[in-house]
Image: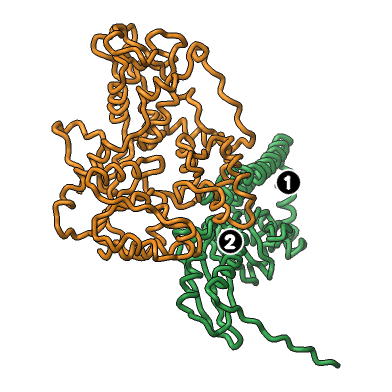
Amino acid sequence: MSSDQAGNFAALLNSLTETAMVQIVLIVAGAWLGIILTQHFLPIMAGKLSGRNRLHLLASVPLLRLCVIATAILLILQRVIEPTLENLIGLLGALGLAVGFASKDYVSSLIAGIVASYEIPYRPGDWIEVDGTYGEVRAIRLRTVEIVTPDDTVAYIPHLQIWNQAVLNANDGSQYLLCVADFYLHPCHNAVSVLQVLRDVALTSPFLQIERPINVIVLEKPFATHYRLKAYPIDPRQQFHFMTDLTVRGKAALLEIGVEFAAIPAVANPVG
Amino acid sequence: MTSTPPADPDIPSLWQYVASADYRPPAVTMEHTVRTGLSAFWQRLRTETPAPETPLKTEAELQSIPDALLEQIAPPLDGGPAALALNEALAAWLDKAHPDQPVVFVIDSPHGIHTAVLQAWAGMREWRVLHPPTANQILERETDWIASWSADSAPWVLPDLERCYLRHAHGLALVRRLLDQACSGALGRGVIGCDSWAWAFLRRAWSGAMPPALTLQSFDWRRLARWFQSLADGSSMDHLVFRQADNGDYVLPPPENTQNESSDISDFLRQLAAYSTGIPGIAHMAWRASLRTIPDEPSADPKTPKESTEQPMTLWVTPWRRLKRPMPTTGLLREHAFVLHTLLLHNGLLAEWLSQLLPLSYPPGLTMLSCLETAGLVEQQHDGFWRVSPLGYPVVRSFLKSEGYLTDDF
């Protein structure tokens, strides 16, 4: 930053009146209050809703926050500087200097958070996996995305992960999340009967979203025939209950038709 | 294949069977939509059970109608008139010696009367009535049940297809075989009745092409007025007048010679038609629940012959907003959604079978059923089957639909 630019910036700040300062404080406080309200009350209201309505309301939280921040910045800029080209260049130069000294990762996460608001790799209510951590997105904050794992542990993942990590989104904003139950059967069996039984196991599950397709994939492995029963639950939050239900009832139904499950023979660990 | 229209084309038949695609639910009033929407929104936001409604002052002056009188002016549903309408609807099919479709399906909503109608119709046509298989026969996939009656070539009626399957991994094979054989003509000519929820599930569980089905046309408020009036006219009481308890408006059109300061027509039947979605069984139950009379009124004696009653007898109808209906919280519905959905898919179940069709993590069936019974959402019938209650059905259906569960088409 040259001495002229620094002088201009100081002149800008010196021109601030007390009234403008009070207005800026009020704008910051109002924006902060608006963000708090949207982050707290909208998820509570969404919890009372179901299906797509819940997801839509949750997804609106980060967008509303972005709107509040953008509006606050615009209102503050109007009070700090005359909106001329010279003033804007001066201000941006000062901001660039500040960013250079500040934490690179922190600012990177903030920028990634803004990018995530319009690229939407995840929304509240989505089930995502980032760097091995899987869970439901509970909130998208300025710097982090907050997810709750199936073990009811809250994980805070910085937005900057989206720059160089794959984000796996299981339902991508919809209420349809594919679940898979695996069965390993002894190779000697009637595969047609097994296919029919597994389809009926899924079809008769109380958790099933019946409007979505049911698929059974069969893979022959060296030690077993691998069946993958794929179906969708009514609510993504029921995915683990659904997979448990498919597995338990699937095993019972298969045993009832006389199918034998595969068992890998135990091999003693070599000593030494 | 629909019932023939009446002589006056402007007045549809009271009981009318139409193709399922031609089913039209009654128009919903704006007031009903707004009231229902606001109520549902409020129910979602609140968590505790709502306080009971406070009765009107006039309610203290009224009492429920004596059972004997109620049986006369709103008797239980009779399948006979609808069976005549069904016979008209099936006339063209019956006339053909070799129809394109060997079987005809008759679909009805919960608390409809398809079983009674088909039994009455079978008696009228002297067709044999088939009894459904037992639960054990269904789960063991015995084909003996089909073989036990299919050797006879006489036409048949199966009034309740929903009793031929269970939503269980082994509960679908029998009904699939039945539908395969029936629709291919291997079982001869027959009529199959089915509950609309079971029909919706079986359409997805059976891979065959479902033939067109008939269904009872919905009852809008005009049709309800004609029906309730005809029921009242059939009683031994003469000059009955039905008026709304809070403002005196006429719920059914008054007799022509009746003079009264108020001649407005109540919107009770419009609200009732919208709430019941035109299902006659539900509207009938709500109608019976709404009727009141003044205690010790001399002319309320049902044993009084028609000739001796000269003055009109007034029966009071509870205002729609005061009629007690189940108002469950969203939490209660969400907690027991599987129970309610399973009951609807089977048009009622015994408690011991219900437990076997629910997820393993669920508590015993009777515990949940008692909770739902207290909330007015389910009821146990004389045959031991638990069903969603008539007045609870609209609430339950609306909730299940909003949650993404499979619902019927009506």
Residue B76 x %, y %: 37, 31
Res A25 → quadrant: top right
The quadrant of the picture occupied by the N terminus of chain A is bottom right
For image coordinates 69% across by 66% down, the residue present is A133
For image coordinates 74% across by 53% down, the residue present is A7
Chain B rendering hue: orange
The quadrant of the picture occupied by the C terminus of chain A is bottom right
Looking at marks 1 and 2 on the same chain, the residue that comes earlier in the sequence is marked by 1
Q: Name the secondary structure under disc 2.
A: helix
Res B357 → quadrant: bottom right
The residue type indicated by label 2 comes to: Phe
Chain A rendering hue: green
Residue B257 x %, y %: 24, 9
Identify the residue position indicated by label 2 in the image: A242
- In the image, residue B245 above or below residue A230: above
Q: Nearer the viewer, mark 1 or mark 2?
A: 2
Residue A77, visible in the rendered structure: no
Q: Chain of mark 1?
A: A
- In the image, residue B233 above or below residue B35: above
Tags 1 and 2 on a common chain: yes
Q: Chain of mark 2?
A: A
Identify the residue position indicated by label 1 in the image: A13
Q: Nearer the viewer, residue A152 or A59?
A: A152
